[in-house]
Every structure is written in structure tokens, then in C-alpha cells.
Image (cartoon, helix red, strand yellow):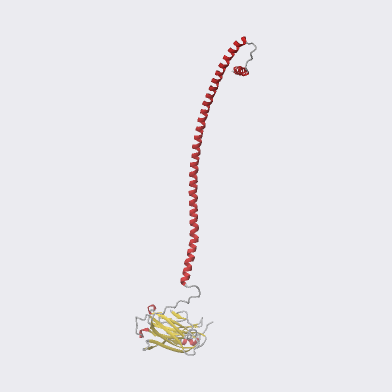
Amino acid sequence: MTSRCINDCSGNGKCDTKKGRCQCKGGFGGADCGLRAVMMDVNISSSSLVGKAGGLKVGDWRYFEADLADLVQDDSLPYLEVALDMDQGSKGDPDLYINDNGELPTLLAHKFQDLTCDSCDGQQTRFRVKKSKLSSLQLVLGVYGHCCAESAFTIRFYQTTPPPVPAPPPTPPGPSPAKSTSSSSTNSSMIATAVVVPVLALILFVAGLIMWRRCRRASSSQFTHNVHQSSMEFSQEIDGERDMSGIHGFASGMERYRMDDDLDDVVSDDDDDDEEEDDDDDDYQEPKPVKERKKRKKGRGMRV
């Protein structure tokens, strides 16, 4: 099934019967290729290009052609700014599209765009582009009726300075950055301390344990040596005393034997005297101590 295009593309394009859309020729646009880019007027006093449009319905386009060669180039103004100001009472929200290749921009084919909500942002749009980013001084601007209502607007094109640096977002309530930095530093120091102190303690403990074992081993070896030396000296003393005790015992035995021999000689002399006296006095009785010495001598003779 084939579909015819609106107004047969106004004779400015070719109809795609499968899709029912027009493929417009260069310089033409719109649903029926009936739109052409309107050349923007040069405002010499403000050194700008100006274009106006009204009655832009939702889904419609308005095109403007800007020739930047009409402006006196100022190297101190490196940016170009497009200002789209909504007319009083206009409630629409048009979007801005730009091409620098001579082709009319579309929703899909464009180089730059600004989709700011015009009815939400003080009824105006400000879009800046650096001139060095443009490949041509011939620009085509397309304004598309995005939503809500008809739009009427004035569009201007002029050279300007770089966009202002956006202000930093407001600081949320809480501690000041200095305090936060200090707190962060304190937390980092606490974490470092918590990690380093146990490690140092472990190292010191291991070093102390190694030194203690070495000292214990050295003292044990010295103690063993001392005990061995003492035992050797004690053994030598015992052996010496044992030798001396044998000598002392032998000397004591010899002395005792000599004393016994002397006593035996005395007892023998006494016996001879007693025999002589027996002849003279038969009634004489031998003293008790002499009898005991005789008995002891006889007993020693029997042992021998």
C-alpha cells in the first residue's frame, strides 16, 4: 500500500510512498518541503543578525539563515551567542537546532542544539558556541515547536565573550571545609596510628623474645659449664680427701699397733716379775688390770 505525501512535497522534494514522508531538497524543509530558511536581517547598531517569527505551532519548524560574514569580526569576542526571546504572553516551548553545512537541521541531523525550557527560564534562551568550532560562516538555524502552545519569538545572533564560569553549588550546612579537612586529617592520623602502633608493638615483642632466648641460652651454657667445673673440682677434692683418709687410716693403724706392742712389752716384764714374786709369796694375787691385759693379749694371739 502506498501513501501520498502532504501537498506532494510542494514540488520541493520527493515523496517516500512507503513511509509517507517528504525528502526535501536542499534549502527546503517542513513536512511538505514548503519551508525555506529566512535570511536574518543585519542590525548594524547592535552588530547582530535578527529574525522574527510568530504562530509557531507544536511540531512545526521555522528556519533562519545567518551569514556571519555580514558581521564585523572581532577577535576579542571569540564566541557567538544565539538569543531566543519569547514574545509577551507566549506560552510555547521552542527548541533550537543549528547546522553549519548549509542543510536545514532536523531533530536527528544537526550539529548544535539547545533544549532549554523557554517558558520555564524567564522566557528566553541563551546559547553560545565558540567560533573556532564552526566549519563555515553560513549557518542555518531551525526552531522547532516542542510543546504546549503556539510560540512567537525574536531570535538574534551576535559575537560575545566566553560564557561566565558557573558559580559553585551552595555549601550544605555542616562543618566548615577547614574543619572537615582537619577532621579528615585527624581520622587519617587515627587510622595510621591504629595500624602502626600494633605493628611496632609486635616487632618489639618479637625482638625482645629473640634477645631473651639468646640470653637464656647463653646463661644456660654458662651455668652448665660452671656446674661441670664445680663437679670436677668437687670430684678432685673428694678423691684427694679419699687418698688422705687412707693415709690417715694407715697411720692411725700403725700408731695403734705400735702402742699395742709397747703395752705387750710392759705386760711381759710384769709377768716375769710376778713369777719371781710367786716363789716368795704364794698368797699374792695378781691385780685385776694385769689379768685383763693378759686376756686381751691372748685373744689377739688367737686372732692372728
Visible residue check, residue 157: yes
Above or below — where is 17 with respect to 297?
Answer: below
Q: Residue furthest right?
A: 283
Task: Give the quadrant of the C terminus.
Answer: top right
Q: Residue furthest top?
A: 279
Visible residue check, residue 26: no
Q: Is residue 289 left or right of residue 100?
A: right
Position of residue 283 measured from the top left corner of the image (x, y, whole percent): 65, 12
Residue at 47% over, 68% down: 182
Position of residue 14 measured from the top left corner of the image (x, y, whole percent): 46, 83
Query: Which quadrant of the structure image shows residue 98?
Result: bottom left
| Label tally | 0
Position of residue 212 measured from the top left corner of the image (x, y, whole percent): 49, 48
Task: Give the quadrant of the N terminus.
Answer: bottom right
Residue at 38% over, 86% down: 48
Q: Is residue 17 left or right of residue 65?
A: right
Q: Is residue 238 left or right of residue 74?
A: right
Nearer-the-camera pick, 123 or 293: 293
Above or below — where is 217 with respect to 78?
Answer: above
Residue at 51% over, 28% down: 244
Nearer-the-camera pick, 97 or 301: 301
Position of residue 193 measured from the top left corner of the image (x, y, whole percent): 48, 61
Above or below — where is 213 with respect to 3?
Answer: above
